[in-house]
Amino acid sequence: MKSKKFEVTAWPEMWEGLGMDVARFDKARQMLGEAYDKLFLSQAQRPEKMAYFDNMISEIFGGRIKEILAAKESGRPVVGTFCVYIPEEIVVAAGGICIGLCGGSPGSIPDAEKILPRNICPMVKSAYGFKAGRICPYFQVVDFVYGETTCDAKKKTWEILDRLVPTHVMEIPSMKRPKDRALWLEEVKDFKTKVEKISGRKVSGDNLAGAVRLINRKRLALQRLTGLRANNPAPISGMDALLIEQIAFYDEPERFAAKVNELCDELENRVKDGMGVMSAESPRVMVSGTPMALPNWKIHNLLESAGAVVVNEESCIGTRYFKDLIAEDSGSMDEQLANLTDRYMQIDCSCFTPNDERVDQVLREYRQSGAQGILHYSLQFCHTYNIEEIKIREACESEGIPYLSIETDYSPEDAGQLQTRIEAFLEQIGD
Ligand code: BJ8
């Protein structure tokens, strides 16, 4: 039951101090609040423990930024990243804060298109546009950003982004042979050295072991949440689960893990009571593909508005971020870095060739989640996911899994056409 109107709180003085375009950003803040009110708070049977995450969105440009500024003042480095291949454990071990800066909004794309080509991935344009337009407090608060060489759009954008914010780049190989692992391990070591140098803080073996335990706890909490969504009726909507997976890249890890676990306790009770957010007859859909950065809720909203429930995200803002843990039996620094590298090498992004383990992973998650169909989601101009879609489609065909592939961007223009396709897909599941 809704009581008062939801609002993303305004902190104009703090934003001014961060050098932001306050007038413009304030409009975006209001729009986010309205969208959140409409899309999230109107959902039926929401778990009570979602209140924490609602508050997190309310304070996303205020209270959380204040916390980060306080940490900065105490000498802790703040590092922005754009990919789940950047090892956040090392940033945390250096006493730092790691923030995901991928862009999920159409609002910043015109800023990017003043300089970047139009026909590249909207996630890259949106992220760049946030910095170019000075309309993201997280971009303003980071000491430096760390990019990677996963896709062409990203790795070339880092050269241009470096003009606006210090941008370092970690080389991620394109294959996973023993010689690639050797290079990767060297890159992880270089990353540690660079983070230590820039932050002026040494990473000890104990610090790293502690950071590994902390981030493992965060990933375990998200695994627990995913496991609970496998129940029918689903105890939480896909919209809320996606929101939590997005907040994972902004929140303080210890608190976030505790709050996700509190929510999971509530969901366990719901499962015992047979209570769900939708009926047990609602079509259950798994979404697989490119990440959906905050506030990209387009596909989940279309699916759930059409009566489906999303039960899994095989995505970097989803299971690819938390399915693998790092071995905790800490040894020497070299052993720990080797364990860390092995964990990161298990992430199956389509930027790799070959990448058949992702096809197996998609099928595994499909079975584990109790989904009845797969929607493959690819951002426009993301060549690697768009081409890898062929293999995912073939695997679904041979397994008899209802399947729909969607390629789209952040604009609302194709919503009507997508809705028609999604409704036809859900009918297919129902047959
Ligand atoms: S590990 S998916 S976070 S690279 S969607 S920007 S690939 S053109 S986001 Fe990603 Fe790391 Fe891979 Fe995950 Fe390029 Fe594709 Fe855009 Fe992408």
Image (spheres, rainbow, N blue to C red):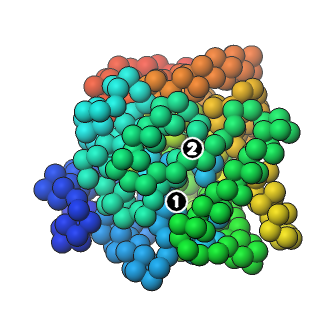
Q: Residues within 10 Å of mark 2 (few under 14, many from 20)?
A: many
Is residue 75 rendered to the left or right of residue 107? right
Q: Quarter of the image containing the C terminus?
A: top right
Is residue 382 rendered to the left or right of residue 107? right
- Residue 248 circle label: 1
| Residue ranking furthest to the left | 23
| Ligand 1: image quarter | top right
* Amino acid residing under circle 1: Ala
Residue appearing at x 22%, y 59% in the figure? 20
Residue appearing at x 42%, y 76% in the figure? 72
**Residue 294 drawn above or below residue 121:** below
Give x and y (percent) for residue 389. 61, 22
Residue appearing at x 52%, y 30% in the figure? 152
Give x and y (percent) for residue 69. 37, 74
Helix, strand or loop status at disc 2? strand
Occupied quadrant, residue 7: bottom left
- Residue 234 circle label: none
Give x and y (percent) for residue 316. 58, 44
**Residue 130 drawn above or below residue 76:** above
Whole-Å distance between the Cαs marked 1 and 2?
20 Å
Name the front one of labels 1 and 2.
2
**Residue nearer the viewer, 280 or 149:** 149
Is residue 105 visible in the rendered image? The answer is: no
* Amino acid residing under circle 2: Glu
Helix, strand or loop status at disc 1? loop
Give x and y (percent) for residue 378. 51, 28
The CB of the residue at mark 2 lies under 8 Å from ligand 1: yes
- Residue 148 circle label: 2
